[in-house]
Amino acid sequence: MQPTASSRSWRSQPVRRARAMIAAMAFALPAPAARAQSINSIPGVIRDAETEQLLREYVTPVLRAAGVNTGATRVVLIGDRAFNAFVADGRKIFVFAGALMDAKTPNEIIGVLAHETGHIAGGHLAALHQEVANAQIFSVVGLLAGAAGVAATARSQSNPNKPGNVGSDTVGQMGLILGPQELVKRSLLSYIRGQEEAADRAAVKYLTATGQSSRGLLTTLQRFQNDMLFQSSAIDPYLQTHPLPRERLSNLETAARASPTFDVTDSSALQARHDLMRAKIVAFMSDASEIARRYPATDVSLAGRYARAISDYRFGRLSAALPQIDSLISTQPGNAYFHELKGQVLLESGRGNEALPPLRKAASLAPEGLPIKDLLGHALIAAGQPDEAIKLLNQVVQRDNDDPEAWSWLSMAYDAKGNMPQAQLAAAQGFFLAGKYVEARTQANRAQEQFKRGTPGWLKADDIMNYRPPKFD
């Protein structure tokens, strides 16, 4: 179950289109190349300050060890329950919510992030694009050669004095056309598998350099191997984008166990935060029966209480949810995300003024949590304070220009002030980031008509109106 549309601080956003080839850098189970997953099939991006902050803390030391610019690299959470992760454009690591739900320790996720960092540091996407280009050239040459062979055969067979079966000879010559394509595919997949193995080795290196264990990476690969026990016999290993899990384990285990940090474990404080994050994701993405099964009433841990409070809120039991949230805040008054949850519940119950104090507290405790500021901006609008909302939300979009919801709230705030050109321009930018290009152009056109030609607002509207999304096969 996806997060509810009303869950503003835990929310889903569409993923903008990208080439299917980025999935070649995916972490998880090998799949035939013909089934390589396109980013277009992924449900959407989930924004949550708590999860984003924890993933940022997980990956930053690894990026530094790899010599990767930490400021230019971002971890993005995808609303899919598969255990997977992949890299896109050399700057973004996409992690599926299912990986966080299933990974019992921080080290398991850190291992996955280290693997993806290996792809970034190794420049694998750029190298893969060049390899694809080379393969395309080779494939064209092979096709031309095969076509020439077919033509020559056809000419010789037009001679009635030449013995032989025309049909079988033609089929044989068609193999000249199909053969190079199959060879190219196998060569390219072999290249990709080599990159996966290189990323695994790099992950061990980075984990060792940061004083962390590679055990979590091995645990994940063991999970993949167990999942494939009943299907690996039917899989052609030469038609996979990844080495088979048993091969990856065999190749990696010796190096991982030789690391002096192999027996290092996660701190209890980090494990506790990981448990809370997992509980939150399960509570927002699962139905009531699954939440109750994973976090029964007998589970008195902080994570269990967190999950049940969210469940009560999601399924309309507000009279039960609010006391539970207050109890969580009493236990950890410095936890920004407990205050955030209380503000969210109050706001979405129509109590915007009451939501402001907990949301202000959450924003002060987690100043990097932009999704919290989005929620606070919404509450300020609901409480009739558009001036403060405009100031706050402009700060958000300046720091994260890829947040369609912040632009949406900013549009509403400008509208509340009667500033229609800015309201329409903000709406256009929100639609644009959400991939709704027709609506974006409509709003941009309305905004542009009210701006003086050549001003910043006019130029921004013009950029949106003239943008045409790329087409992908």
Image (cartoon, helix red, strand yellow):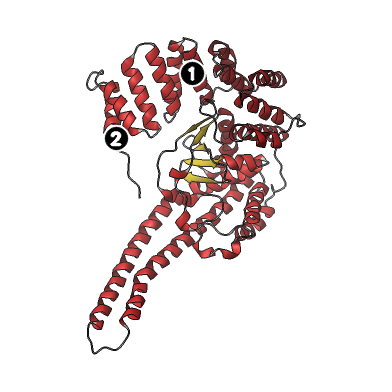
* N-terminal label among 2 and 1: 1
Residue extending farthest right: 298
Residue in the image at 61% along x and 46% along y: 111
Task: Look at label 1 and name its amino acid.
Answer: His
- The residue pinned by badge 1 equals 378
Q: Nearer the viewer, residue 91 or 156?
A: 156
Determine whether, in the image, residue 118 is placed left or right of residue 228.
left
Q: Nearer the viewer, residue 216 or 280?
A: 280
Task: Look at label 2 and name its amino acid.
Answer: Tyr
Q: Looking at the rendering, in which quadrant would you find the N terminus?
A: top right
> Within the image, what quadrant is residue 346 found in?
top right
Measuring from the top left, give residue 29's x and y in whole percent: 56, 53
Please say if 284 is above or below 173: above
Determine whether, in the image, residue 472 is placed left or right of residue 39.
left
In the image, which is nearer the foreground, mark 2 or mark 1?
A: 1
Q: How far apart are the alpha carbons under marks 2 and 1?
A: 29 Å
Q: Nearer the viewer, residue 16 or 60?
A: 16
Q: Which mark is residue 467?
A: 2
Measuring from the top left, give residue 267's x and y in whole percent: 71, 36
